[in-house]
Amino acid sequence: MSKLVSVIYISMDGVVEEPAWSAPFWNDDHGKFQAGQLSQSRALLLGRVTYDGMSQAWPAMEAAGEDVGEMNRIPKYVASTTLKEPTWNATVIDGDVAAAVAKLKAEEGKDLLVYGSGDLLDHLIRHDLVDELKLFLHPVVVGRGRRLFADGADPKTWHLAATHVFGSGALVLDYRPVRPVES
C-alpha cells in the first residue's frame, strides 16, 4: 500500500493560493527538499489549476536546458471534470476522485505526492486519504486568498511528526492524521 503525501506552500496567515509569495524564500535547500520528496514518489496527484500551471512551466524549463530531474518524467494524475486532452504524462481522474485515489493508494510502491492543489487536498482530507501533510510554512503574511482550511472544515486532529527549518526562515511542519484505533 502506498502513502499519500501532500506538500503545500502556506503563508503565516494560512493562504495557499497562488504561492508566488514564496519565491523570495526559495534557495538550494528548498530544491533539495523538494527533489527528495519527488524521489520518494511514484506519481503526482494534482488539481486542475495546479496542473495547468505546472504543465506549462516545467516542460519550458527543460526546453531551456534546466535540469528538472524527475518532474517531467513522473506520471501525473489530474482531478478534473473539464480536462479532456491531458499532456505532460498525465491521466485524468474525472469520476469519483476519492475512490480513484483509494485505489491508487492500494497499489504497492512509492508514495503518491500531492503538490499544492488546495481544493483537491481539502477533498482528500475530508475522505481521510492523506497520510502525511507537509505544510511548507513561509514567513510572510499575504492578507487575502484561499486558506487551506475554510470555515466549516471537519474537525480533525494531527500529530506533528517532524520539522525542517530552512535558513530562509521557511520551515516544513510534517503532520500525520491521528486516526482512531480499530478494534
Image (cartoon, helix red, strand yellow):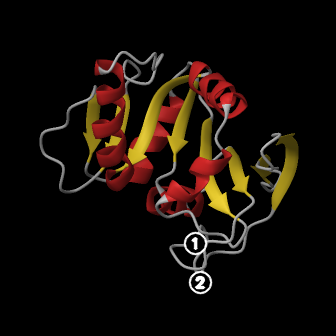
The relative height of residue 16 versus residue 145 in the rendered view (above or below) is above
In front of the other: 172 or 103: 172
For residue 13, side relative to residue 23 (left or right):
right
Three-letter amino acid code at the position of disc 1:
Arg
The relative height of residue 106 versus residue 176 in the rendered view (above or below) is above
For residue 36, side relative to residue 92 (left or right):
right
In front of the other: 19 or 158: 19
Name which residue lies at 48% across and 16% down.
Answer: 69
Nearest to viewer (mark 1 / mark 2):
1
Q: Is disc 1 placed on a helix, strand or loop?
A: loop
How would you rate the neighbour count of disc 2 (Cα within 10 Å): few for under 14, some for 14-19, many for 20 or more? few
Real-space CA distance between mark 1 and mark 2, rounded to the nearest whole angstrom: 12 Å
Q: Mark 1 highlights which residue? A: 147
Residue 36 percent location from the top left of the image: 66, 23
In front of the other: 97 or 86: 86
Per the rendering, the mark at residue 12 is: none
Viewport quadrant of the N terminus: top right
Name which residue lies at 51% across and 75% down.
Answer: 145
Does the rendering let one see residue 90?
yes
Q: Mark 2 highlights which residue? A: 152
Residue 81 percent location from the top left of the image: 22, 56
Name which residue lies at 75% across and 60% down.
Answer: 139
Q: Which residue lies most toward the left here?
A: 85
Residue 83 percent location from the top left of the image: 18, 49
Labels 1 & 2 near each other (Cβ < 8 A): no
Q: Total of numbered circles in the picture?
A: 2
Q: Is disc 2 placed on a helix, strand or loop?
A: loop
In front of the other: 121 or 138: 138
